[in-house]
Amino acid sequence: MGSVDTLPYWQVNVPENERTEECPEFLASLSVKDIGVIGTPDSQYHVSTWPQVQDIVAENRLDDFRRIPSQLRQYLEYNWKLKQDYGSVMNFVLTQRLHWEAPVKPRGRPFEFEDDVKILWNDWPYGIDERIVHLVVWTKFDLAEDPITTDLTNEARAEIEQYVQKTFGSRIPRDRYIWFKNWRSLKSVHAVEHFHVMLFDPDPKFVDEITNGDVPLCRKV
């Protein structure tokens, strides 16, 4: 049916007998970035190493994070189906992953109460070294942003840093964990506050403990 170079982006990484002539609805209206990723053969994708991940976060180049092409396709298809079934990704996250009621309201100040925070696996992690555990820390409270830059305020950044050090730094060497909060434009779920934590080669028992045995969706579908 043609070489990869001549295939439309939605046919790449798809077995020949499963390719469609027309673009599936869940792959229509993609950004230029996502079209480029979807149209790349998995064999040409380079998984990011831990040092590369550290550099991306340190230099705030969060847009450089990408999913493996075939996994991005799965992610987009799954989210498309979620919107059909639940009305929005946010509704699914709230009811099926977090089990929080809307509207989400905190019990206290940021990080004051444990039940205002929930740590889960990232359901669809980036294309990174498989030894890296990608977690999402969901919060019922807002994390204050500068209204001009939309970056975290110094106070919010200090609060997160203190929480991360207490939760992860007590069990993992400092050079084996990092955290970041996505720019507003990169968030896939806008209405529920969250930030990301990545751990390099942690003890699986520790991960099970802090996530309460959570399993990411990418392992279930």
Image (spheres, rainbow, N blue to C red):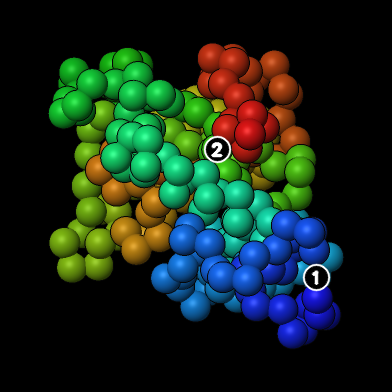
Residue 117 position within the rendered picture, expressed as x and y whole percent measured from the top left: 35, 24
Tell me the residue at 34%/24% (across/down). 95
Instruction: Give the numbered dot on residue 28.
Output: none
Query: Which of disc 2 and disc 1 is earlier in sequence?
Result: 1
Q: Quadrant of the N terminus?
A: bottom right
Query: Does residue 141 appear to the left or right of 89 in the view shown?
Result: left
Q: Say which of 158 and 133 sits in front.
A: 133
Residue 174 position within the rendered picture, expressed as x and y whole percent measured from the top left: 62, 39
Q: Quadrant of the C terminus?
A: top right
Q: Are marks 1 and 2 in contact (CB under 8 Å)?
A: no
Query: Does residue 55 appear to the left or right of 100 in the view shown?
Result: right
Q: Is residue 123 visible?
A: yes
Tell me the residue at 57%/44% (across/down). 124
Element assignment for label 1? helix
Tell me the residue at 63%/71% (across/down). 21
- The local crowd at label 1, few if under 14, some if 14 to 19, many if 20 or more residues have their Cα within 10 Å, is few
Can you say whether 47 is above or below 204 in the image?
below
Name the quadrant containing residue 106: top left
Can you say whether 9 is above or below 94 in the image?
below
Mark 1 to mark 2 CA distance (whole Å): 23 Å
Residue 160 position within the rendered picture, expressed as x and y whole percent measured from the top left: 37, 39
Instruction: Give the numbered dot on residue 44.
Output: 1
Amino acid carrying label 2: it is Asp
Q: Is residue 154 visible?
A: no
Tell me the residue at 59%/16% (across/down). 213
Q: Say which of 173 and 21 sits in front.
A: 21
Q: Say which of 221 and 138 sits in front.
A: 221
Instruction: Give the numbered dot on residue 123.
Output: 2
